[in-house]
């Protein structure tokens, strides 16, 4: 069985989240931090040998204070990230065990990932060496000119919105990250760097529920989506999230006006 390492880049500044008190990855979502929700689908898989979370240096004290018990119990490795995403991934790659054939990079701010998407992208990575989940663009795309007017309507038939986890054969990702200074112009994700190497990346069907939290509104959407992706457990043995049921019961009842205004 191929073995996977999973990297959760969590060293960003959350500048668009707009909450000066707390970064989005630490926000509470049904009794568990967003980043822990993002890690959840990987933690009990037989094909995942290591989960690594890469945090900002200024978050180390807070992270240890809040989550040290969780990371110890769940065997999650914590590293300090870099100034940008590619450097953060590079630092996490340094601690990936040699037995890991593949590396998945998953946004720490995507807490609504389903096991079905993970299964599809892992299988495609084994077959093709690189794979990305994505969803087709459903809306009409307009390109805006410098005057604020529509400059063109872009055909959407082949357009997709990329998601994570993005999964690569380990040596392929290591090479792309090592050459990021040469390849990185215009690349906004790891797949962009791998593409710049000339290696094709397979697209598998993602999920519209696999949203990335960017604003507080997204957190409300995640609260509404999460029960569809990860139904709450109401029995079974004790676990490190034994108080999570209370979090589910306290989830806000989302009304349309909460999401879209009156």
Image (cartoon, rainbow, N blue to C red):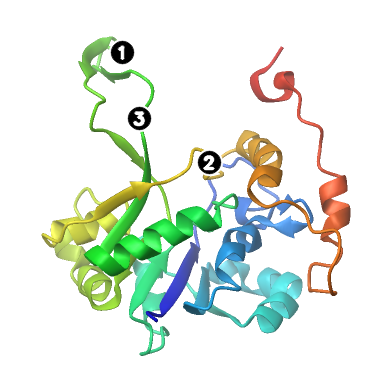
Instruction: Give the Cα separation between the discs numbered 2 and 1.
Output: 22 Å
Label 3 SS:
loop
Q: 261 or 245, which lies in front?
A: 245
Residue at image location 15% in from the left, 61% down from the top: 199
First in sequence, mark 1 or 3: give its number. Answer: 3
Residue at image location 88% in from the left, 54% down from the top: 246
Label 1 SS:
loop
Single out the mark in the foreground, 2 or 3.
3
User: Can residue 222 be seen?
Assistant: yes
Instruction: Give the Cα separation between the discs numbered 2 and 3.
Output: 23 Å
User: Can residue 83 be seen?
Assistant: no
- Residue, disc 2: 16
Q: 62 or 235, which lies in front?
A: 235
First in sequence, mark 2 or 1: give its number. Answer: 2
Position of 241 compared to 60: left or right? right
Q: Residue 19 carries which label?
A: none
Q: 246 or 196, which lies in front?
A: 246
Residue at image location 25% in from the left, 54% down from the top: 202
Single out the mark in the foreground, 1 or 3.
3
Q: Residue 148 carries which label?
A: 1
- Expressed as whole percent of the image width and height from the top left, the position of residue 139 reads 38, 21
- Residue, disc 3: 137
Label 2 SS:
loop
Quadrant into which the N terminus falls? bottom left
First in sequence, mark 2 or 3: give its number. Answer: 2
Query: Which residue sits furthest bottom?
Result: 98
């Amino acid at each position: 069985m191929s073995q996977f390492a999973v990297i959760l880049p969590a060293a960003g500044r959350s500048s668009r989240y707009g909450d000066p008190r707390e970064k989005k990855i630490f926000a509470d979502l049904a009794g568990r931090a967003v980043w822990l929700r993002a890690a959840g689908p990987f933690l009990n898989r037989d094909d995942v040998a290591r989960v690594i979370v890469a945090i900002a240096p200024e978050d180390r004290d807070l992270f240890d204070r809040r989550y040290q018990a969780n990371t110890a119990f769940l065997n999650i490795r914590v590293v300090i990230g870099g100034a940008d995403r590619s450097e953060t991934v590079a630092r996490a790659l340094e601690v990936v065990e040699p037995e890991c054939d593949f590396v998945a990079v998953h946004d720490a701010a995507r807490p609504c990932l389903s096991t079905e998407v993970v299964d599809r992208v892992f299988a495609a990575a084994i077959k093709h060496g690189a794979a990305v989940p994505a969803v087709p663009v459903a809306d009409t795309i307009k390109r805006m000119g410098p005057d604020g007017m529509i400059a063109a309507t872009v055909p959407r038939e082949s357009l997709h919105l990329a998601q994570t986890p993005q999964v690569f054969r380990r040596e392929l990702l290591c090479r792309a990250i090592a050459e990021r200074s040469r390849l990185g112009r215009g690349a906004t994700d790891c797949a962009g760097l791998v593409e710049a190497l000339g290696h094709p990346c397979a697209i598998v069907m993602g999920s519209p529920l696999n949203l990335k939290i960017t604003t507080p509104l997204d957190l409300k959407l995640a609260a509404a989506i999460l029960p569809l992706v990860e139904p709450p457990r109401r029995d079974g043995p004790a676990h490190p999230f034994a108080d999570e049921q209370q979090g589910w019961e306290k989830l806000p009842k989302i009304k349309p006006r909460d999401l879209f205004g009156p």
